Amino acid sequence: MQYDSVILGIDPGSQLMGYALLGVRAGKPELIVMDALKLTKEKDIYARLQMIHSHICSLIKAHHPQSFAIEAPFFGKNVQSMLKLGRAQGVAIAAAMQYQIPVTEYAPKKIKQSITGNGNADKDQVWKMLQHTLAINDKPQYFDATDALAVALCHFYQSNSVLNKTGKPLKGWGDFIAKNAARIRTVT
């Protein structure tokens, strides 16, 4: 299928890495693929990092995304976990940079807010909204995959926001209407 653009969304992890590709056609997002790369069979952390890099490179070669969106690390109490997550995220970003794809990071709360309207939504709420928005029936095996899809859809929303297209901050509804007169419809 031919898309106007493709967004690669990543939920980084050192045990499971969620990934999703979202195609945009005529301004509407469509799911291409979502899944998770299971890394737990490999005990060596460096081999896991190589697997992440290779997998992302193969996704890029196969689908030619124009955008790369990744979830920013969640700051927890376990320093070792944060270090592993940071490495996984860094390798994923390096793969995108290798192909000169622009990288955008989104905080977990920003992603949830963008998808559900609630920055504190749980994973099931996010999944249900993704199902509704993208007309998806089958639930993936891991929430890491749906998290990656949420990252990609968040990027779609942020990139296509009316507020991002005007260039300058709006000064209220009057300013919005003046700059978007072609979008106004009268209801009778």
Image (tube, rainbow, N blue to C red):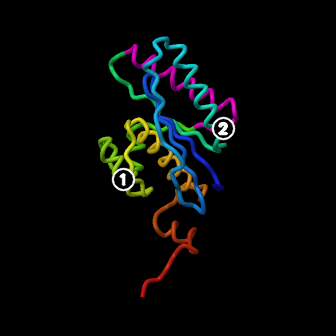
The x, y position of residue 82, in whole percent, is 42, 19
Give the residue displayed 38% in from the left and 57% down from the top. Answer: 132
Q: Quadrant of the N terminus?
A: bottom right
How far, Cα to Cα, is label 1 from label 2?
A: 28 Å
Q: Which residues are magenta?
A: 79-103
Q: Decide: is 13 above or below 160.
A: above
* Residue extending furthest toward the top: 44
Q: Nearer the viewer, residue 21 or 77?
A: 21
Type of residue at label 1?
Answer: Met
Residue position for label 1: 129
The x, y position of residue 110, in whole percent, is 42, 43
Dominant secondary structure of the residues highlighted in magenta in the image: helix
Q: Quadrant of the C terminus?
A: bottom left
* Residue 80 within the magenta-colored segment of the rendering: yes
Q: Nearer the viewer, residue 157 or 24?
A: 24
Q: Which mark is residue 101?
A: 2
Q: Decide: is 47 above or below 2.
A: above
Type of residue at label 2?
Answer: Ile
